[in-house]
Amino acid sequence: MWLAIKEAIFAGLQYLHDITGDYGVAIILLTVFIRLLMVPLTVKQTRSMYELQRIQPKIKELQKKYKNDKEKLQEETLKFYQENKVNPFGGCLPLLLQMPVFIALYQVLGGTPGQPGLFLSYIAELPEAQQAAMTRFWIILPDLTATPAAVYGDAGILAVLPYVALVVLFGLSIWIPQMLMPGENQQKQVAGIMAVFMLYIGWISPAGVLLYWVTSSLIGIGQQQIQMRFLAKKEA
């Protein structure tokens, strides 16, 4: 099953590359396709987020009323969610569904010479003169299979700058959606710490994987803001 997912992602990249001639563009188009498949879920996620924002004042009232009785607070909060038909975890599903794609793409694009991913195995069979051109994303990233850490180690600080910019965008793509979600400041501080940790994950991830995640997050944030404004206008 897992091998089939990786092979499907690789086949999709190959098909889109045949159309565009650039694997970076192919990754972006694959991301758009995956986000389109997830539209029903993301619409439901955004509606759940909107409802959570709408009832935040009442939740704060309950927290103030039962601040000395955590068990009662939990009971009343759950009851309030049920009465208002709000799922506080409704926003998690699209993120969870993206993780298998993220991991599969990591394994497709990444690997080592001893255990190469599907993409590296494919590139290794090409003439050496073609290999560099096949892994390049336009003039932005010289190698989509390279990690920022490896680029820095091999070529130094100037060569790694485009990859560092992508790592920063990756961290922001984790942090910004969390800041836009309703919740307490303490929860958002935890999200900020997680985003900093994800900078390290980005540092050791293939650039193509980061390109996928950043593109996906930008699409998600745009869709979320459009739908939130639509719901607010509809309610008004």
Image: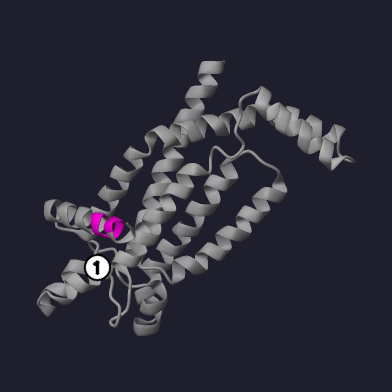
What residue type is disc 1 on? Answer: Leu
**Residue at the spot x=40%, y=55% of the render?**
100
- Residue 147: give x, y in percent of width and height: 37, 72
Quadrant in the rendering for residue 87: top right
Quadrant in the rendering for residue 159: bottom left
Q: How many marks?
A: 1
Q: Is residue 111 above or below residue 97?
A: below
User: Is 53 left, or right, of 163 in this rendering?
Assistant: right
**Residue at the spot x=63%, y=38% of the render?**
182
Of the pair 163 and 39, the residue shown nearer to us: 39
**Residue at the spot x=33%, y=59% of the render?**
2
Q: Is residue 190 above or below residue 158?
A: above
Q: Is residue 190 above or below residue 232?
A: below
- What secondary structure predominates along the stretch shown in magenta? helix
Can you name the residue that lies furthest to the front here?
A: 1
- Residue 199: give x, y in percent of width and height: 51, 65
Instruction: Look at the image and say whether residue 7 sits in the magenta stretch.
Output: yes
Which colour style is shown? Answer: one colour
Instruction: Look at the image and say whether residue 6 sits in the magenta stretch.
Output: yes
Indicate the quadrant containing the C terminus: top left, top right, bottom left or bottom right: top right
Identify the magenta region: 4-8
Element at badge 1?
Answer: helix
Residue marked by disc 1: 118
- Mark 1: give few (<14), some (14-19) or many (20+) Cα within 10 Å: some
Quadrant in the rendering for residue 122: bottom left
- Residue 158: give x, y in percent of width and height: 37, 76
**Residue at the spot x=9%, y=77% of the render?**
127
Of the pair 4 and 212, the residue shown nearer to us: 4
Indicate the quadrant containing the N terminus: top left, top right, bottom left or bottom right: bottom left
